[in-house]
Amino acid sequence: MRLGSIILFVAFCSFTAYYVYEPIPEEIEERWKLMLTNSFFRSLSHLADISELLGLKDYMGVMYFITLLEKIAPVSDEHVKVTEENFDGVEVVLYQPKHRGSDTDLRRAIIYLHGGGWCLGSSRMSPYDLLARKVVTELDAVVLSVEYRLAPAHHFPIPYEDVYRVVKHFLQKGVLAQYYVHPGRIAVSGDSAGGNLAAAVTQQLRREPSQQIQLKAQALLYPVLQALDLYTPSYQQNQYMPILPRTLMVRFWSEYFTSDKAFFRAMMANTHNNPESSSLLKFVNWSAFLPETYHRKYNYSAPAVTEGAAAMDGPSRSLADPRASPLLVPDAALRSLPKAYILTCEYDVLRDDGIMYATRLRAAGVEVTHEHYDTGFHGALMFTVWPTDFLIARRMTDNYIKWLKENL
């Protein structure tokens, strides 16, 4: 009996070690912590697949457990006043410094957009709450965190439109005066899908001549910026990397546009482009916009264009919409954009999106600070809460806040 128990225990330990272990590059710090963290993400993903297959609950409905797990009720503390408000029909969490100088002292402001592939995430998650408080206290700034509606219940362009309404509402003289915000010191920022929304909103605002108050800066943290080519070198190199494997990113994209699984399959095969979107592939030609050091062993091949993709009218039109893929705008639309901070990670499928955008912005004359983390992985900035707190997250946060302090 004792021998049988020992055998079962050894078998269990062996299976657990096999499941947890992943061939993560040696360069990544705290590799075992990342393996353990990702084993939770993978387990939940497997459960979501099974649930959807059995017709119990859709994939993103199960994955939303990640959001619920870290969700909190933001409250004020001795340094930061926190209120939950409604800006033009959209929920926002507003963080303000409690202590003020004179009434003539106006503050910086950062409009922050959370990540989560447009399907997951919340401004009320503990990592975003911690980041907002740190920005408020270190910059004496106002932070506006937007609770936009999520796909698949709300497909594109609803999440974008929610964010756009909030930004337009906030950038009114009367609203800024209410929160003691300087109209010339406002930035929009976001991570991952939030970086996508931040870039898209920034572009749209600059296209409106009637918009009197403009953003001074945009800070994009490992942003997702295009849906046309899902086989860039970083998508290929990092397709099995923890936290955001290629399959999950493609699923996020497809769920953002439609719940039709045929579109997901087409995107997985990189055969989702139609004649309309194919005319914009020149803006994501990574052989031209990606420095050679990132080409690695990969050779450029333009994604296939299929007439069949045109049959999926809504999703196919969305592919070519710069509100969904900010990288697709022509050079002329980039020239008037505000200064940018772009953070990218080597071990991230979205690495090349950010690098190509930095390249194109610089070529258009925009001031760009590109901070690349050779040991970074997707989502690293948000891993600040025990037990998933990473040293690299602290460095990223410090450098991000330092840039805001110097440029806003």
Image (cartoon, rainbow, N blue to C red):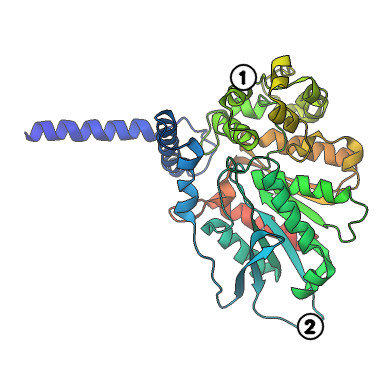
Pick out the residue farthest to the bottom: 102
For marks 2 and 1, the one nearer the N-term is 2
Q: Tag 1: residue type?
A: Ala
Camera-nearest residue between 135 and 250: 250
Residue 321, given in percent of the width and then of the height, sits at 78, 35
Residue occupying image coordinates x 55% and y 45%? 120
Residue 234, given in percent of the width and then of the height, sits at 65, 29
Residue occupying image coordinates x 87% and y 61%? 213
72, above or below 388, in the image: below
Residue occupying image coordinates x 42% and y 39%? 44
Relative horizontal placement of residue 41, taking residue 168 as reference (left or right): left
Q: Tag 2: residue type?
A: Asp
**Circle number at residue 269:** 1
Callout 1 crowding tier (Cα within 10 Å): few <14, some 14–19, many ≥20: some
Helix, strand or loop at mark 2: loop
Relative horizontal placement of residue 134, taking residue 87 as reference (left or right): left
Q: Which residue is mark 2?
A: 103
